[in-house]
Image (spheres, rainbow, N blue to C red):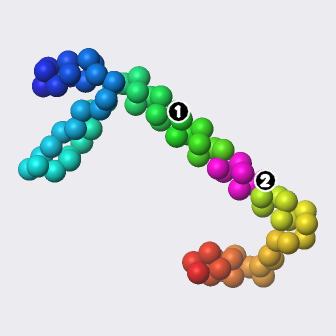
Amino acid sequence: MADVIEDVQASDEPTVVLQRSRKAAYIVKPEHYERDQAELRALRRAVFLAEVREAEAEYEAGASRRFADIEELLDELRG
C-alpha cells in the first residue's frame, strides 16, 4: 500500500485501483480531491442561483404556473 501512496504523491494523475480487471476506485492526492470538491460545490451553487433567477424572472413576467395545492405541484413534478 505504501508503494501505491508514493505513486499517487509522485503523479498529478489519479491512480486506478482494479478489482478483477474492473475499475473499483481511484486514489488521488488530497489537495486534488479538495480542489475538485470545491469546484463542484461552486458549480452546483451557480446552477442553483441561475435556476432561482430564471424562476424569479418567470414569476415577475407573470409566466409562472400556479397550483391549487401541493399535490397538484407534486403531480406536475412527477410528470
Choose between 45 and 12: the one closer to the eye: 12
- Which stretch is magenta? 47-53
Tag shown at residue 50? none
Task: Tell me: 44 left or right of 29.
Answer: right
Q: Residue furthest left?
A: 20
SS at circle 1: helix
In this view, the residue in front, 10 or 41, is 10
Q: Which residue is mark 2?
A: 53
From the viewer's perspective, tell me whether residue 31 is left or right of residue 55.
Answer: left
Q: Give me the disc on residue 38.
A: 1
**Residue sitting at x 85%, y 59%:** 57
Identity, as a three-letter code, of the amino acid under mark 2 = Arg
Residue 66: x %, y % from top left = 81, 77
**Residue 20 shown left or right of residue 40 in the figure:** left
| Secondary structure mostly taken by the magenta-highlighted segment of the chain | helix
Residue at left offset 59%, top offset 81% = 79
